[in-house]
Image (spheres, helix red, strand yellow):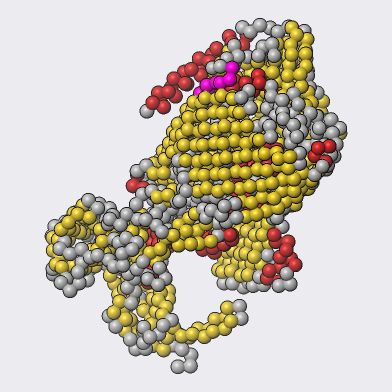
Amino acid sequence: MQIFKMKKTIFYLLIFLFLNIPNCLFSEEKGYSISGFVKDQSNGEDLIGAVIYVEELKAGTVTNVYGFYSFSLPEGTYTITYSYLGFKPYEVTVIVDENKTINVELTTQNEIIDEVVIVGEKKQERLRNTEMGVAKLNNATINKIPALFGEVDVIKILKLLPGVMSVGETGSGFNVRGGAADQNLILLDEAVVYNASHLLGLFSVFNNDAIKDLKLYKGDIPARYGGRLSSLIDIRMKDGNQKEYRGNIGIGLISSRLTFEGPIVKDKGAFIVSGRRTYADLFLKMSSDETIKNNKLHFYDLNLKANYKLNDKNRLFLSGYFGRDVFVFDASDFYMGMNWGNKTFTARLNHLFSQKLFSNTSFIISDYDYLLEADLTDLLEFKWESQLKDYTIKSDFGYYLNPNNTVRFGVIATYHNFFTGDASFEWDSIIGDFRLPNNYALEYSLYLSNEQKFRNILTLNYGLRFSMIQNIGPTKVFHYDEDYENTGFTKYEKGEIFNTYAGLEPRLALSYLATEKSSIKASYSRTRQYLQLASNSNGGTPLDIWIPASPNIKPQISDQVAVGYFRNISEGRYETSVELYYKSMRNQIDFKDYAELMLNELIEGELRFGVAKSYGAEFLIRKDEGKLTGWISYTLSKALRQIEGVNSGRWYNANYDKPHDISIVMNYSLAKRWGVSATWVYSTGAPFTSPGGFYDFNNERIPWYSDRNGDRLPDYHRMDLSISRYSKGIIEGKSYGTLNISAYNVYLRKNVALIRFEADENNPDKMNAIMTYIFRIIPSISYSFKF
Amino acid sequence: MKNITIFLILLTFLFACEETIEWEVDESIKKMVVDASLTNELKQHPVLLSKSRGFGEESTQMIQGASIELSDGTNTFNYVEDIQNPGLYYTENEIAGEIGITYTLDIELPYEISGYTNYSAEATMYPVFELDSVIASYEEETYDFFGYIETYVYCGVKISGTELETIGDRYIFKLRNNGVLLTDSLDELTFFLDDPSMNNFELVEELFFYEDTTEIKLNDTVTVEVHSVQDAFLDLLMYYPQAQYGGDPLGLSGPPANVPTNISNGGLGFFVVSAVSSKSAIVFDNRPDK
């Protein structure tokens, strides 16, 4: 295969580059460091990805996720511009004769009223940096887009970007460039979120009021991240307002939100508390009927964060997320309850060793659990619980050696605890306890990368990540023969390491500035994945469990190559790009026909392994400034799988293979206080397995199926609209309210969620195809008040 | 498990609607279907050959003019077509299968179906255990469902027996009344499979339950048959309801797939080879006031 030859070449190239680092780094002219933080003047929030541009060098850099930047300049006088979308650019003349710290606070540009001044050169940053397959969304963009039930949801918006698909309309699960839903690494302030869904995927767990910034990597995931094959969604929570106490109240059809933030010590530390709760079930309380009154159906989220600047060199961040879905059916004789949720906790310390060396050390806890219980008085009691808990320590370093080289390195170690499942029941007088063996694993990685610029025309970002997983006891490992039949098991003692997988993950990206307005980029990345979700369903359910690589499950490995052409049109008002990718994945997992995944201790025997490939072209035109903003994206792609024993070993379409996918997102500022937004999406119908006919056997009619996913549902398309009106305060920069009216699926398209076949009631010999569609038009209204 | 599924389905489809739609299927693609059995009873053993049917077809097309052979590795037995029943074939002579022997069924069709005229199936006859007892009686039961009280009469058939010492045994149970097979469709079959934790299991069960007492009358002779069957046939019994539904809406059981078969060349159906043991009992009245 061509791709494997290419990998070898890339591997040697990486080694060559690393060996050259010392030469490249130290042959540079000696200079002085300019470093500092870029913040939002109104609230002191760090600005992530703000552009710092040095006019004389026609070169620049961007701030990291903590708003920090650093670069060095030879002695001289320079004009430096700091800019960030939606903020007034700040220009400063600097005499560089010593190391300098320049902290900048940018002021907001009232984007509803004004055209933002376009500074053409700065637009080049997008062309010059090596990032491909990357999409950024900030809080303001996310808020404008019409939402189902008026609940703004970042994950839903991600699906509007090229290369991002989802199987069904409702699920929060999504697929990036032909990867499975469990191949996305979702980080909230660096903590892994294992189940990003509320209400079985109708909504995601991310409350937009608490989110500052979201970045999606579809291709060249930076070497500092790993653990999933297909994508990284890096979500950063707001840090809190360092200047004054502020708040935001939102009232919607199904939920209400409250955010409150303010300084702990002005300009030194801040906190933010943001909560959201759905309240459909609060109305049930009003009922006089006891059986209705006690029922519960809600979810809530709570985001907490605080940060404090200990001194000029140290800053501490604490953040947490707590969310839960609760369903309770409680009649006098019958109780059934189910709840699940994520908890994450992150403690981080930013430390500046010097102006050139920035570090962050984090301690992270991620926790996902679910509980299902039923109680039929005097008859049956049932309880089932499962939990996944991670403890992580990581240290990341950024060494801003000179204007042309930024070296990053770090180490990460995670201890995974899989409390796979514990079910107990009491039926009549029989008491049973069914416990699946717990699993424990240690996952480590080390990385080193360098972003290197050559004469401001060519930028290379190359890195190497080494990752490893070790399965440790106490646990029980089942053995299987070649027919996947269980042949016994081995028990391992506490702390005993019984299985290790390790490997290298080279990453390489380059960007070549072809003209002032266009660039060509290319990337190669290998990713390894050691955890997988045992889910046979399309959208994912809360009861799915994560299982680690083990003696029976090899780590998943992916190789992706991509090339892209990026061009700014009309002085950078429009950003356009075309990206082509090819991805080859090994040790992919599927399930045997009629697999039993729930509470099955022999679950590994239900798995089947194989390969997957995907390829495609992504077209994007995006406008972020002016009265009209938005984007149009089109993806042409294919995602295929070949798994032993599935579909007779032949290639088949992945569940999320939708060759054509179009999204149009438009936001328009109508007048000073009015905004309208519209989205339109179209995609080829999702593949499904349909019967080719029926046969009679032993007086039963049984369907026969041809190829797995050989058929398709009708094409999917939908339009959503929303209109917002802001109160006067927005112009004066004071407290203001926003009234939003939106409608989902405005032209009442019956989008098919599934098709099933059953005998006609009047003529049992005739079979009917019955489609299920979920949403017709869903109008909604919400009001929020910012104070 | 079923409750959870229903619960989830209810939640997801709180807003869902259904509608019958037109669906095009290539009706020209047909599959060969075999419904064949062989036991250790001395008799003429049947094979039924038919074609699969499309969505709009209201009757099954039977396959006539096939030539069928059964082989036990040394001997070959021929089948003859039943003139009255198109598609039905019987062994020419009365034969009895033997435990431990692997049988091969070879079918040659007069014309191609799905690109083949030859189909075959292979199955081994496994031993079966003997029932210790069968008790068939009319019973009366009262149930109280959240205050709703009802009394009803049913005919229950209880069995007892200890399944074999070997691991991996699979059995199905059939019921006859005065010689007539009552469990004549897949959904009426009861099955048992052992595993290391259930091996040599002593079965004491009320296996059959007929609420409609016109089907079994007092003093009828009921016979319970135990058939040892192939692994894959038991899988067929377990999975065909899911195949019929086409997977559940949330896909908890995964995408639909074909139920197992042991017919070659993409044929459907099954060649079931089984050793049979049976025990009979006279139906008596066990109701308290009788």
Q: Is residue A586 left or right of residue A166?
A: left
Q: Residue at x 80, y 31 (%)?
A: A44
Q: Answer above or below: position of A170 versus A398.
A: below
Q: Nearer the viewer, residue A531 or B24?
A: B24
Q: Is residue B105 left or right of residue A473?
A: left
Q: What quarter of the picture does the N terminus of chain A occupy?
A: top left
Q: Residue A524 lies in magenta, yes or no?
A: yes
Question: Where is residue B49 shown, x and y percent of the image?
Answer: 23, 63
Count the marks.
Answer: 0
User: Please, what is the dominant secondary structure of the magenta stretch?
Assistant: strand
Q: Residue at x 72, y 30 (%)?
A: A115
Q: What quarter of the picture does the C terminus of chain A occupy?
A: top right
Q: Residue at x 41, y 41 (%)?
A: A641
Name the quadrant containing residue A290. Answer: bottom right
Q: Answer above or below: position of B125 versus A257.
A: below
Question: Where is residue A537 shown, x and y percent of the image?
Answer: 50, 51
Question: Where is residue A114 shown, x and y percent of the image?
Answer: 74, 31
Q: Is residue B93 left or right of residue B146?
A: left
Res. B123 in view = no
Q: Residue A235 lies in magenta, yes or no?
A: no
Q: Answer above or below: position of A220 versus A634.
A: above
Q: Residue at x 65, y 14 (%)?
A: A58
Question: Where is residue A27 shown, x and y percent of the image?
Answer: 61, 7
Q: Is residue A32 left or right of residue B50?
A: right
Residue positioned most to the front: A671
Q: What segment carries the magenta color?
A: A516-526
Res. B176 in view = yes
